Image (cartoon, helix red, strand yellow):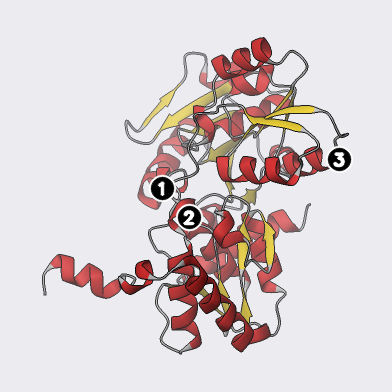
Amino acid sequence: MNLFDTLKAQKPEMPDNYNQLTEAELIERVEDVKAKMGRKLFLPGHHYQKDEVIRFADARGDSLKLAQISARQSEAEAIVFCGVHFMAETADILTRPDQEVFLPDMRAGCSMADMADLTQTEKAWEKLLELFDDTILPLTYVNSTAAIKSFVGLHEGATVTSSNAEEMVSWAFSQKERILFLPDQHLGRNTAYNLGVPLKQMAVWDPIAETLLYEGAMEDIKVILWKGHCSVHENFTVQNVKQIRRQYADMTIIVHPECRREVVAIADDAGSTNHIIQTINNAPAGTSWAIGTEMNLVKRIIKEHPDKHIVSLNPNMCPCLTMNRIDLPHLAWCLETVEKGEPHNTIKVDPAIAFHAKKALERMLARV
């Protein structure tokens, strides 16, 4: 068996006939499996999923919220996670050993999470300890692999979400003089800045060059940011903000903290996905908003709020490409294989990795 055949055997492809089915036929198949399995099946859906998929979700939310909700489904035997790989990993870490987690399309990854692998992180940690001794605590955004969460947990650190990043960074500074923030430099920079850390006290670790990017005195560094980013949120620009200001003088601009610092600085508000959703929900009718986050979600918010004028901060923005991997054919295929007892695309984190990753998650959950 050649390499291509081996990979196909490890990650079976969806049969072509699913792409030949009509939308009505696919919907019927999904509904049929959900009806047959009842409470034995739980289907969490991330906010960035397509409408054709999110309509079937038993719960909507961000990745951590969905993983926590999944863990509370005592009757669920199968959890089909409509999101990306790291989200399904987190669900597997937090759920019981007898519960199985599945991802409808194994190609649904996260470019940000992939920007920090374990080998790179271990090399970086070794060099940073040489520079700063035992004065650093690692934190990782939940948008990271199980291996990175495990590394952070092993070294007494914790995970953070975009909702609780400030609380967790404050906690980290109560433990050590410095922090290493993985893998999203923009969330780390925006969070530390909001807490009063000057930009001149923030360095960036380049994992490719294996170099600390900083021009000042090393002893002044308080935050070491991993050189990673969200490929969606990094594409919102200062020019986008200026264009909205010119076009709509009365429009409020709200963005996700994964956006660049210069964009967050001139926006009217910044916050997590949940913060954005709740802010728009609570806004008076007739108000105007430009939203800087993933396009599937922005379009859904626009549809759900016809009484408000809402646009994307960048009208040329594409949806998250990896989130878009989960579509109706893959969902139907995954559900039918699970219902038949012949599942593919099982997400199972190695117990040794899960042990320390869970510690990182639990340190966060104990403080927020």
Q: Residues within 10 Å of mark 3 (few under 14, many from 20)?
A: few
Q: Confirm or deny contact between disc 3 and disc 1 (CB under 8 A).
A: no
Disc 3 element: helix
Question: Which residue sits at x=33%, y=35%?
Answer: 208
Question: Which residue sits at x=56%, y=61%?
Answer: 53
Q: Confirm or deny contact between disc 2 and disc 3 (CB under 8 A).
A: no
Disc 1 element: helix
As drawn, the label of residue 145 is: 2
The quarter of the picture where the N terminus appears is: bottom left
Image vertical order of residue 175 relative to residue 266, above or below:
below
> Mark 3 sits on what residue?
282
Of labels 3 and 1, earlier in sequence is 1
Relative depth, front residue between 296 and 351: 296
Residue 115: quadrant of the picture: top left
Query: What amino acid type is highlighted by mark number 2?
Result: Thr
Instruction: Give percent across and percent down for residue 360.
Output: 62, 57
As drawn, the label of residue 114 is: 1
Instruction: Give percent across and percent down for residue 271.
Output: 71, 36
Question: Which residue sits at x=67%, y=32%?
Answer: 191
Q: Which of marks 3 and 1 is in front?
A: 3
- Please give left or right for residue 325 compared with residue 65 in the image: left
